[in-house]
Amino acid sequence: MAHPIDAFVPSATHSPVVALLSEHGEPIRRGFFSILTALPVFGLMNLAGFGVVGGILAAGLVAIIGLAGQLGIAVALAWIGLGDRIAVGAERLDADLRWYYRERRGPAAAVLGLSLVGWATGALETVSKAQSRSPAEPMPWPTGPPARGTTRCASR
């Protein structure tokens, strides 16, 4: 069964970028997810008191195992290695955050206020763009295959 979104998704024949990502996308995705998994492991290892070198070694091990395609095993090894030591570091972090939000209310309120302003600005931008676009206006992406012999996608 064809899905309505299929007409909007370009294939490798439509674009050289799509062809490149179709061919090399898996290693890029594995590397991206490995790094995103290794960074918190590095931070948690430092929090647990293993130091910078221990954090780098553990994060590197997680990244290498993740690059090999076994990200679940890498995360499990990281949690097994941290064990109970992370609980002590998490309690210390919790106490530090509690102190910050109780004792330094001005900066904490400024962070919260700026976060709310950023959220509201994004919501207003989305609403204004949705209202300014005419329903009859064509979408700015390709709706079908390009003409034979062309590699660029036609818009409008």
Image: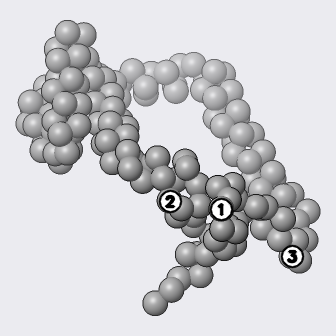
Circle 3 crowding by C-alpha within 10 Å: few under 14, some 14–19, many from 20? few
Placement of 43 over or under 78, stated as above or below: above
Circle 2 crowding by C-alpha within 10 Å: few under 14, some 14–19, many from 20? few
Residue at figure coordinates x 66%, y 22% from the top left: 106
State which mark lies toward you, 2 or 3.
2
Q: Are marks 1 and 2 in contact (CB under 8 Å)?
A: no
Circle 1 crowding by C-alpha within 10 Å: few under 14, some 14–19, many from 20? few
| Left or right: residue 128 compared with residue 147 | right
Q: Are marks 1 and 3 in contact (CB under 8 Å)?
A: no
Q: Is residue 126 visible?
A: yes
Q: Amino acid at mark 1?
A: Gly
| Left or right: residue 79 compared with residue 118 | left
Residue at figure coordinates x 21%, y 23% from the top left: 60
| Left or right: residue 152 compared with residue 35 | right
Earlier in the chain: of badge 1 and badge 3, it is 3
Label 2 to label 3: alpha-carbon separation: 29 Å
Placement of 75 over or under 8, stated as above or below: above
State which mark lies toward you, 1 or 2.
1
> Mark 2 sits on what residue?
12
> Mark 1 sits on what residue?
149
Earlier in the chain: of badge 2 and badge 3, it is 2
Q: Amino acid at mark 2?
A: Ala
Placement of 62 over or under 15, stated as above or below: above
* Residue at the front extreme of this rendering: 149
Percent of width and height locating residue 156: 84, 65
